Image (spheres, grey):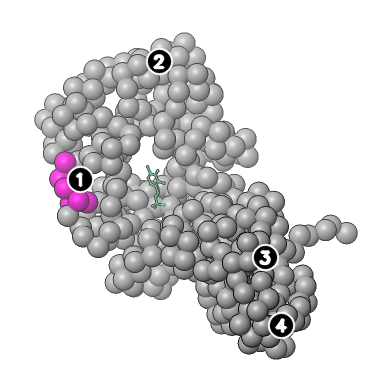
Amino acid sequence: MAHHRTTYAEIDLSAFRHNVQTIRSLVGDSVKVMAVIKADGYGHGAIPCARAALQAGADTLGVGILEEGIELRENGIQAPVLVLSGTFPEEIPDLLHHDLSTTLCTDAMAQAVSRQAAQSGVTARVHIKIDTGMGRLGLRPEEFVAFAKRIQGLKNLQIEGVATHFSSADEEDPEYTQLQLTRFRDVLGELKKEGITVPLVHCANSAALIRFPESWCDLVRPGIILYGALPSPGYRPFVDRLPQTREGRGFLPVMHWKTRILQLSTVPPRSALSYGQQFVTRRTSRIATLPIGYADGLHRRLSNRMQVLVRGTRVPQVGRICMDLTLIDVTDLPAVEVGDEVVLFGRQGEALLLPDELAQWGDTVAYEILCSVGKRVPRVFRY
Ligand SMILES: *Cc1c(COP(=O)(O)O)cnc(C)c1O
């Protein structure tokens, strides 16, 4: 009999497919969809998410690093894969061997990719990146056209895509995104004048694709929204304003993080709980101990700030979150028993607690909440 840890993450792949289909319907058939499954599918499991995304109509996959691309190939996934973060020269042989596309931003890398592709008798596909204001990867707009001209003629190298990335598409004020889009379009116009045509022009992450249809171009690169979470806690109104698609409106949460009550105790008023006595009871309290802690990815900075679901009701977490254990206050739920299910985020009956809320309580973003769910938390897939 297999033993299952009581702390686990349920991954609802039908919700994931629904979210991919919703994006697919929204952008229509003339726009390609790259499902971004970097960081082990934002913590959900890269391989099941990759398969589900392709089944649901995604055309290509985006990964963060080379190893994530190799993992896809080793699991038999043959769809086009782009390594979004770029690669080092020593990674080129693996890149070519596994037929992965890379983001490319320097002459040195372009020459190295071309040389090694020629030696291996293959064509390397690359996406070149314009830094329109993120300041992270890519060439500045004024350097870009000359760069594209220099590398265009390199042997065994095909420029498959031209891309940029937005820094602020989730923010209330659209101005900076519009500025980045204008800079992007200007460079694309110059490329065209030089006779350089590239099959895939792309820039839209989740926040941009939902809010700025003018950013769709040839391909969109949604990540967070496919997992049913928001780019930032204040982003909800933009999702709510989306037109209705065949699939209905909105996106469904994919991960449901669950545990069970390990111990229950009744403690008198003025009892100090957990390390550092950061919580002291004010009344006779019923305290439940959960077998989950920051070693599972439940951030310690959420201590005394977060809530969980028990019997479909929100109750507060109390005291410092420990490495393996966490306390919650169930005084207001007298029927609670040892073994009861506790939901850290996700659905419990009719009740829903979103990773976006944990992000808000922890001064972070849902991305970090999802990616943090640790490797000792088994993923249980529902197909
Ligand atoms: C992560 C990433 C995305 C997806 O971003 P979301 O905000 O999760 O939609 C798109 N493009 C690039 C280059 C990325 O690194």
Residue receiving disc 3: 274
Mark 3 neighbour density, 10 Å: few (under 14) some (14–19) many (20 or more): some
Q: Which residue is mark 2?
A: 112
Q: Earlier in the sequence, mark 1 or mark 3?
A: 1
Residue 56, how many percent across, how many down? 49, 57
Q: Which mark is residue 233?
A: none
The residue positioned farthest toward the right in the image shown: 1
Observer-side mark, 2 or 1, equals 1
Query: Is label 1 or label 3 in front?
Result: 3
Q: CA distance from mark 4 to mark 2?
A: 69 Å
Inspect the image, locate mark 2, and give the three-letter code of the amino acid beneath it.
Answer: Ala
Residue beneath disc 1: 180
Quick one: 264 or 100, which is closer to the camera? Answer: 264
Is 67 on the left-hand or right-hand side of 375? Answer: left
Real-space Cα separation, disc 2 to disc 1, in angstroms: 30 Å
What is the x, y in percent for residue 196?
20, 28
Label 4 vs label 3: CA separation?
15 Å
Q: Earlier in the sequence, mark 4 or mark 2?
A: 2
Question: Which of the 4 image quadrants contains residue 207?
Answer: bottom left
Question: What's the residue type where badge 3 is placed?
Answer: Ser
Total count of labels: 4
Label 4 belongs to which residue? 268
Specify the amino acid type for callout 4. Answer: Pro
C-beta proximity under 8 Å, tags 2 and 3: no
Provide residue 233's location: percent of width, then percent of height.
38, 65
Q: Earlier in the sequence, mark 4 or mark 3?
A: 4
Disc 2, ligand 1: is the CB inside 8 Å?
Answer: no
Q: Which badge, 1 or 4, comes first in the chain's sequence?
A: 1
The stretch of residues the image draws in magenta is 176-183
